[in-house]
Amino acid sequence: MPAIEITSHILGIIVFASLCLWLGVAYRLFAMVHSKCTIREGLHLPKPSGIPVSIIVPVHNEERVIDRCAESIRSQSHANIQIIFVLDRCTDRSLEILQEHAKEDDRICLIENDNCPDDWTGKCNVARIGAQKATGDWLLFTDADTQFDPELVCCSIASAIKRDASLLSLLSSLTITKTFERVVQPIAGTFLVRQFPVDRVNREHRSRPFANGQFLLFSRTAYESIGGHTAVKDDLLEDIAFARVIHKEGGRVQMLFADGMLRCSMYSTFEAFKTGWKRIYIESSTRNISRLRRSAILAFVVSILLPAAGVAGIVVGHQVSPWLFWTSIASLIAYSIVIGWLYRINNAPLIFAIFAPIGGLVVAKLFLDSASMLHNRTPVKWGGREYILEPK
C-alpha cells in the first residue's frame, strides 16, 4: 500500500475522532448554556430585607484594585451589612486608601495583621481573623480584586435562601483587557471547568462540589458547624476544599454564573497570571503529578495536534480521498465553532480565538511546570509567602 494511502487512513481516523470530540464538546456547551443559572435570578426573588450580612475581604498589597472594590461594596442596596477588611502585612498604600473609606462609612472595620501560624495559609488565616469579628447571619468572603454590582449582595442572599444553600458561590466575569487575558485566559478557565463542570455542581445527586474563592457566601450555621477556616487552614485553594467539606457534611453547595454582577481582575501581569494558574492547577488536580501531566498532553493534543491533523487531512484528502477531505473540513468547522464559543463565553473578543493554539500551548506548559514544581518541591508563591507542597 502506498505511503500516501497509509497516511490517508491514519488521518481519516484522527479527523473523524476529532469531529466526534468537537461535536461532543459543542453538545456539552449547549447543555450548559441552556441550563445556565445566574445570580440575576435573585432580582426576581423576595428581597431579604433586614438580614445581617458580614463581608470579609482579605487584603495583601492591593492598592491597584482596593479602591473600586471598597466603593462597590459600600454601594450595595442591601442595607444591613458589615464590611471587614483584614490587611495582611501590607507594604503599599492599601491601608491609606481604606482609611479614607472608613472615615466616610462607619460600617467599615479595618484590621491589620502582621503574622501567620506556620500551619496556616496566609489567606485562610486573615479570613479567620475577619470572621471572628463578623456579626452577620451570613458571611461573605470575597477578594480585593472584585467589583460588585449594587444588587449583588441582595440577590445572593435571596438565591441562597431559595436554594437552601449552605455555601453559595459565583463564577465571576473576568476582566479581558490585556493581551494575555484575551489569548490564554479562556483556555485556562476551560481546563479548570473541565474538571468541575458547572452543571454538575448544583445536582441533587452525584454532584461534584466546587466553589470559587472570589465569592463564598456561607450561612453562619454552616460555616461554624465545620469549624470555619480551621477546616481548610492549609489549603491553597480553600474554595474547593470548603465545597468538599460542606458537601461531605451534608450541606448544599450551589454555584451560579455572575453574569456581569461580579467582576474580577485577577492578575496585572503575565508572570502573576502564570504563577496564579499554576497554583490553581496544582490544587485542583489534588497535587497529583500524573494528572497534571495528562492534562498537559490533552491541552497539546486538542490545541495543536487535532487542528493540524484537520489541515493535513484537507491537503491529503484533496489528492486521494474526498471522504477525508470533507471530514477534515467538517472537523475544522466544528473546532472553530467550539473555540469561538468558548472565547465568547469568556468575554474575549472573537478575533482572539485565532490564537487559541498559542493559548493551548501556554496552558500545556503551565500544567507541565506545575507537575515539575510538585516533583521538585519548588515553593509556590502566594500572598507574600512561599509554600512547599507535597504530591499526593
Image (tube, grey):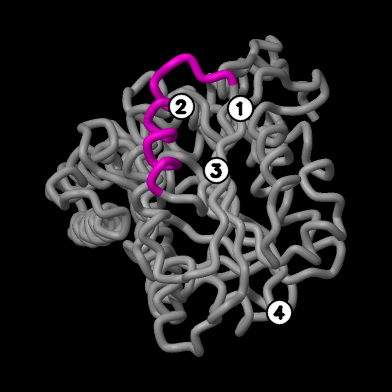
Query: CB under 8 Å between callouts 2 and 4?
Result: no
Q: Which residues are magenta?
A: 89-104
Q: What amino acid does circle 1 point to?
A: Glu
**At 50% across and 43% down in the image, what residue appears?**
143
User: Which quadrant does the C terminus fall into?
Assistant: top right
User: Which residue bears the numbered disc 4?
Assistant: 204
Q: CA distance from mark 2 to mark 1?
A: 9 Å
Task: Kindly indicate whether the residue at mark 1 contacts the one at mark 2 (C-beta within 8 angstroms).
Answer: yes
Chain-order first, disc 4 or disc 1? 1
Tell me the kind of residue under disc 4: Glu
Q: Amino acid at mark 3?
A: Val
According to the image, label 1 marks what residue? 112
State the SS at label 3. strand
Q: Is residue 97 magenta?
A: yes
Secondary structure mainly formed by the magenta segment: helix
Mark 3 vs mark 1, CA separation in Å: 12 Å
Left or right: 41 in relation to 344? right
Q: Which of disc 3 and disc 2 is earlier in sequence?
A: 3
Q: Is residue 239 left or right of residue 102?
A: right
User: Does label 2 or label 4 sit earlier along the sequence?
Assistant: 2
Q: Residue tagged by mark 2?
A: 95
Q: Quadrant of residue 208?
A: bottom right
Q: Are marks 3 and 1 in contact (CB under 8 Å)?
A: no
